Image (tube, rainbow, N blue to C red):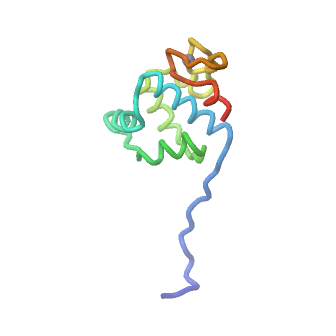
């Protein structure tokens, strides 16, 4: 009705490379457990940390992320990974998140090209 009324603005999406790396470590930890994004979402919900499927997906793919410390600890808890390993990796202790070219890690299922991102 009133165009001059202040609008609630959405905070800009921040694509921050360090945050994206954390999201990718969560992804690797998820893949190493053989979990889908939906399974991770359900596990988060079970410990009282509901998170939208699209939020997980968006973080992993685009790096758009505003993760709280609470969320970070919740991810670490459900994925059974020390929280420090989500912060400073590598997540996979078999391949150090870096399988040789042409190979897929049998533990975390990461392909070399997924590391390039
Ligand atoms: Zn691995």
Q: Could you tell me residue 35's position as x and y percent?
A: 40, 29
Nearer to me, 71 or 62: 62
Where does the image place residue 39, in percent across and percent down from the top left? 36, 34
* Front residue of 93 and 34: 34
Q: Measured along the vertical axis of the image, is residue 45 above or below residue 5?
A: above
Q: Position of residue 84 (x, y in %)?
A: 58, 23
**Residue 98, picture quadrant:** top right
| Residue occupying the far front of the picture | 102
Q: Residue at the spot x=57%, y=13% of the render? A: 93
Residue 92 on image: x %, y %:
56, 18
Residue at far bottom of view? 1
Q: Quadrant of ligand 1?
A: top right
| Residue at x 44%, y 25% (from the top left corner) | 79
Name the residue at 56% across, 21% down: 91
In the image, 55 versus 101, the foreground residue is 101
Number of numbered discs present?
0
| Looking at the image, residue 107 lies above or below residue 20 | above
Looking at the rendering, in which quadrant would you find the C terminus?
top right
Residue depicted at 62% across the width and 58% down the height: 12
Q: Residue furthest left?
A: 46
């Amino acid at each position: 009705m009133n165009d001059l009324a202040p609008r609630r603005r959405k905070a800009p999406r921040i694509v921050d490379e360090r945050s994206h790396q954390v999201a990718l470590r969560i992804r690797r930890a998820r893949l190493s457990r053989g979990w889908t994004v939906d399974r991770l979402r359900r596990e988060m919900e079970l410990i009282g940390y509901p998170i939208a499927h699209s939020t997980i997906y968006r973080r992993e793919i685009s790096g758009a992320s505003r993760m709280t410390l609470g969320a970070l600890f919740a991810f670490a808890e459900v994925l059974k990974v020390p929280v420090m390993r989500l912060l400073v990796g590598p997540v996979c202790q078999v391949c150090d998140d870096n399988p040789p070219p042409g190979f897929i890690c049998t533990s975390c299922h990461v392909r070399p090209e997924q590391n390039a991102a």
